[in-house]
Image (cartoon, grey):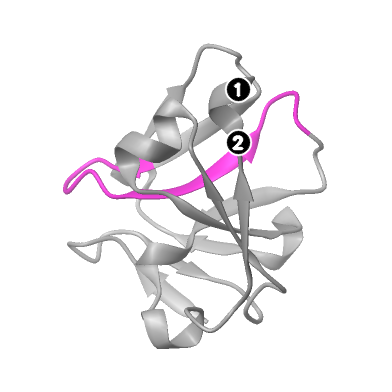
Amino acid sequence: MRGSCHCGAVLITVPSPPEQVTRCNCSLCRMTGWIGGYWHPDEVTIEAQPDALNPYVQGDRMITTWNCARCGTPGHWTPRTAPPERMGVNMRIFDSQEWRHLPVLDVDGARF
């Protein structure tokens, strides 16, 4: 699967659809419309110029969320203290026909 930010400056490729997608209601996911798919970092290829990505570290400092510097699309997150064998990719950057049929895991992130 290959996806991109709105303007096309950031391209992300993953080997296959995830087993499920995650929809979280924490403030960050809720405000960005994030629906996540998760892979080992070695399975994700990110193509972008060095200055094309803006990092954002939320309050608990467990992950860094990366947004396109030009159009602002949230594309992926990388672990800081979260398990290093997992990173998240915003499923909305891919054609929805590739993932909308997948089971959805609703996570109550607002409670934590």
Quadrant of the image for the C terminus? top right
Look at the image and give the residue range highlighted in magenta: 67-82
112 drawn magenta: no
Q: Residue at x 53, y 26 (%)?
A: 110
Are the two marked residues, 1 and 2, in contact with CB atoms closer than 8 angstroms?
A: yes
Query: Given the image, on which type of amino acid does mark 1 rest?
Result: Arg
Residue 35 badge: none
Q: Is residue 104 left or right of residue 2?
A: right
Residue corresponding to mark 1: 111
Image label count: 2
Relative to 97, is 63 above or below?
above
Q: Residues within 10 Å of mark 2 (few under 14, many from 20)?
A: few
Please state the horizontal and vertical placement of residue 89, each as a whole percent of the image. 53, 56
Please state the horizontal and vertical placement of residue 33, each as a whole percent of the image. 34, 48
Residue 108 badge: 2
Tell me the SS state at disc 2: loop
77 drawn magenta: yes
